[in-house]
Structure formats: structure tokens, C-alpha cells
Image (cartoon, rainbow, N blue to C red):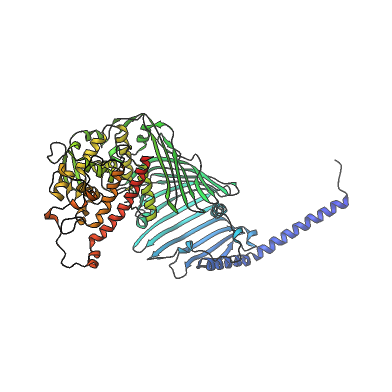
Amino acid sequence: MKDFLTAKQKKWLWISLISLLIIVGAGFVYGYSQRQVFLDRAVKKVKTKLKNDYALNFEVQAYRFVGLSEVEFQHLTVIPDQRDTLVDMQRFTAKVNLVPLLWGEIKIGKMGIYHGVLSMVKKDTLSNYDFIFRKKKEDTGKNEETSKSFTDLAEHLVKSIFSKIPSDLEMEDFVVSYEENSHKQKVTIPKAKMSGGDFSSSVFLNDHNAEWVLGGNIDASNQTLLLEISSKDVDKEVPFLRNKYGLGVSFDKLIFDLRQVKKIKKNLLLIGGAFSYENLKINHKRLSDSTVTLPQAELEGGIEVAENYIALKDKSTIRIKDFEVSPQIKLTLKPSKKVELALHTGMFEAQTFFDAIRSGLFESLEGVQVEGSIAYDLDFAVDLDKPDDVLFVSKIDDEDLKVIRWGKANIDELNHPFVYNAYEDSVLVRQIIVGPENPKFRRLDQIPYVLKTTVRNTEDPYFYSHNGFEQEAFKLSIATNLKEKKFKRGASTISMQLVKNVFLTRKKTLTRKLEEILLVWLMESSGQVSKDRLFEIYLNVIEWGRNVYGITEAADYYFKKAPEELTLGESLFLSSIIPRPKTGLSSFDHTGHLKSWVMRHFNTYGSIMRKLGELNNVDVPENYGFYEVVLQPALRPKAPVVQDSTLDILEEHEMIIRELEEEERVRQSLLEKLSGGNEQ
């Protein structure tokens, strides 16, 4: 082989290589000899940063190198200013990368945690972990235009979390506890090990009251995580949630599979993966009055994090048995907060949906069998700064649907006489026969036209034309509740009220509401009970006062009349108190005549009925009969001893009046929208 280097060139090459090795060796020797100095500087830097940024006092009794690059810390503590101790660790070891240490940065390889305690304590409004939510001091010289976007912050957060996770870990006797006032729980990890990213461990609740087994893999360099958590005990709740939020959660197995964290555009981060569970049980008073059991489901897809929104990745899928759906969810953060939800199922076999409903979740639907295919479309959007502009469009194609067998709630029973159970909250007050056997029962054709018309206009103007739900009412309900920042108004139609009262509990929970919606849908789509029969039952069972049920009792209670004798004015009054039946008597003064504020209801609904031509064949007295309504003498309140308007305003019923007037304004708004839409 031809020699390309001269003897002189070879000589200088060897001199260079030897010199480089000497420099590197000298640097290594110097670094090795000074590593404790560098470690001192790094520890001091950490102490200063934690103190300045988070008001945390970081103390270590002793620390030293063990071997070439392993550092051992003895009795390490973290104590927030004027708070309880957060971290107390007897021994902590870590293999430190020496090169970053030269710049005062600690980069950890293998880690060991021995006899450690993480104690989160909250007393009243103070906690020893509130530093997490405390903002660091801002750099006043920072240009706002150069600040990181929301996408960059999310990407940085994910990278920061994974960068803190070592590929090798050993843990012995580690305890995490949470204490809030008198409530305290703890979880103990006797031993845990991670090697090359593979990990396994057991976690015990309190004094071995429950055990969960953890296993999986973490790949910090590729930012992936597979975590499987299995419970070795039946129905053991996840710690901390019950005392903190009143939420009980238990499961047989949970699987988290984070498969991808990728920036696919400059301002778009994709976090992809899957989540599944087996026998998940949830208990919360606002969700249901009993534990909700969800046997199995899979969620696959991901989350998009953009500069101004967070959204569910397109075609993300929820799968329960053979039922599969791909919702679209998006939360826009700026320039204003906007929530969007869309669901377009396409045609699917209706029975797969009911088969996916766990036994015990919706008791009234258990055993339902249907035939045919259905399709559901939902488009919802609301700007939280402009709730009145809410978009809500809900459509279902169920022409092919047939109910083969009803469940526990047999809708077909409504076609025959049945016993209605009248409840006061959850207490059974009375049982009422709905049928000719009851002398108080009235057929629909026996109830005066004016009463039927006023009730329908007040409660459900398009009862005879909708399929159980009124979209405008839903929109108004959503807008009202968002503006009030609490549940202030529902959107119940006559069909929904009837199903709730006849077949369901009175509990105001999410599952009960969903059950009501599903049952109403089946009832209306089946067409097995006519609208006239539903309205007839409604008028014979609804509450009209304390222990006053049905139109016969209401007419007799207030006016000592039979239903057939009710006038337009008396019908308007009875329709006005349906939303708050126990407040009916507060509408009258001591002479038995209606108070002036009730005139609003008469004017609103009287004029709307005239506008719709529903009073063309009715003798309409002045002010729609307002002054002709007279309460029967036995129920009239005593005449006031002192006529003092100031005292009168302070009376309890005046508070009720103001609430009723507000309710009237809302109902008038809805009815005017509906009647206006009807004319177009």
C-alpha cells in the first residue's frame, strides 16, 4: 500500500495525539480531584434557586462521592417557609454525569431512594405544597413578543418531566402521605426497581388496607410511557380523592400508553396514545345516588396542543364493547375562551348502544331490546364571553328504530290505568290511580280548553310537534347556566317531566338526567303512547301545591270548583305556579285576590296565545280574567295588622316573588323565540 504520509508528518501526528491524550487526561484528573468542589457549587446553586423561586429550604446533612461518579446524600429535607416538612429522606444516591457538573448542573443517571417520606399537609387554607402554584419572579426586561407560545410551554413541560426520570431506579421504604385537617391517608412503596426503563412495584394503602401492582416501561429519550396498574383487592378506592373531593374511584386495571410526543408544526404539538380500563367504579353525589360501574372501555387517539387551543386529535375513538364513537372536542383559549363539541356517528345498529350500557347504570333501561339502525349528529359551540350566542344542534335519524321489548320502565303501561307514586324528594307521599277507577281522574276531553292551552304554552309550547326535546329550550338553559355560573335552569319538556315523575327517582344527578333523556327518546320515537295520552297523564299527576296532585285536586283546593268550571284567568294562574307549586298561595292577598306582580304572567301568556290565534273562540275578559281570580276563603292569609311597605318587602314570600318574576322573564324570552320561529 502506498504510504501517503511522510515520516515528518507521521511524527507530528503522533505528537498531536499524545498531546491531546495528555490534555484530556489532565482535565479528567483535575476534574476528578475537584469534583467535590463542583458538587458543592451545584448543591449551593440548587439551594439558592429553590429558596429564591419557591421559598423552599433545602438541607442536606452530608453528601459525598462514592466511587467514580455516584453521589450519596444523607438525611435530605425540603421545608417550605413557615410550613410543615415536605420531604424527609434518610438516604439518596445518584450517579451524576461529570461534564454537566462543571457548569453547576446536576444530570442524574441511576438513582436510589431509601427510607423517604413525602408529606403533603393542608391546614385550613395553608399547605406545604402551594409553592407549586406560586409564580416565579418575572424577568422585567423580558420582551413579551419573545415569550414562549403555549405549544412550546407544553413541549418544554413534557421534556422536563421525562428528563428528570432516570433509566435505572431503586427505591426502598418510600411513603407518600396527604393530610387535610383531621383526614389523613398514606401510600407506601416497600420496594421498587427500574432497569433500562422497565419497572415494577407494589403500592400499599395505609397499613396494607389495599394493594396495587404497577408495571411498565419508560423511555425518556423517546418520551414514551407504558403504565399498567392492577388492583389486588376488590373495590378498593384510590386514596386521597374521597376526603378531598368526595369522589370514590376503584378499578381492576388501568392502562396508560403514551406512544408519541411530537411537534408536527411550529405551533402544533401532538400527544398520542391510548387509555383503557377494566371494571372502573365511580361514586359521587352529583354523578349518581349509587356507584356507577363501567366494565370496560378503550380510548385511542391523542391531544393536539396549539398556540391558542387544545383539542382531541381527529378520529380519536372511544370503544365500549361493539359500540364505537369518535367525538370532536376543542377548547380555544384566545382571543376568548370557546368550547366546541361535535359528534357524528353515521348509521349503526341501535342495539349495540344499549348492549354497551352497563347493567345497573340506567336501571329503567335494563332489558331493553330494539331493532334497526340509527344515526346521531350533535354540533355544540359556545363562546364563554358570549353565552347567548350558543350553538346547539341535535338531530337523530331513528325512523328505522323499533322497540321490541321494554325494560324495567315499561312505557306501554302508560296506555292503561296505573298507580302513580307521588314523592316529596325521596319520600313516598301518596299513591294515585291514574284511570277511571279514580273519581278525581279526568280524561283529556273533560279538561277545559283554556286550561290545556295555558299549561301547554307555559310549560311546553310545541309539545305536539317536537320529539320529546326542544332545542331552543336547551340553548336558553345552557346560556342561563353559564351566565349564572351554576345550574339555574333546566330544559324539561312535558315528556321529560312525565318520564321523570312516573319512572325515575327525584335525585338531581347526571346519570338520572341521562337516563331521562334516553327513556324519553325511546318513548317518543316508538310512538306507542300518543301525545294526547301523555298530556292527559301529566295534567292528572303533576303537583299543584302541598299534597295537591292533578287538576281535579288543584281546582278544588284553590277555587272549590270542578276542573270543567275553570275560567281563563284561573287557568292562567294554575299554569303560573307549575314550576313552583308550593308557592301558589303567596300569589294572593288577604282579600283572596291576586297580587299585582302576577299580572306579568297574564299579560305575557295571554298576549302570546292571542298572537298564535289560540283564543279566537274563547270569551276573553279584561286583563285575561286577572281580577276575576279569587282564592277560596279558607286559604286566604290573615289581613296584615300594620300596613308597612318596608316590612312587607322583607317578608319571605316577597323573596319568592322576585324569583318567580325572574323565572317569568326567562320563560317569556323562550316562548317569544319559539312563537317567532313558528311564524316564519
Give coordinates of residue 137: x percent, y percent.
54, 66
Please give left or right for residue 404 compared with residue 226 in the image.
left
**Residue 363 vertical placement versus 348 (above, below):** below
Q: Nearer the viewer, residue 324 or 98?
A: 324
Question: Can residue 438 be seen here?
Answer: yes
Location of residue 346 (image quadrant):
top left
Please give left or right for residue 274 compared with residue 108 in the image.
left
**Residue 423 in view:** no
Residue drawn at 12 percent across, 37 percent down: 437
Looking at this view, is 444 or 196 the one in front? 444
**Residue 480 or residue 361, whichever sits in front:** 480
Number of disc labels: 0
Q: Nearer the viewer, residue 12 or 296?
A: 296
**Residue at image x 67%, y 63%?**
31
| Image location of residue 279, percent across then percent down | 37, 42
Quarter of the image that includes the N terminus: top right
The residue sitting at the bottom extreme is 82
Residue 390 position, x and y percent, is 42, 47
Viewport quadrant of the C terminus = top left
Can you say whether 385 is above or below 503 in the image?
A: below
x then y, percent, for residue 98: 63, 59
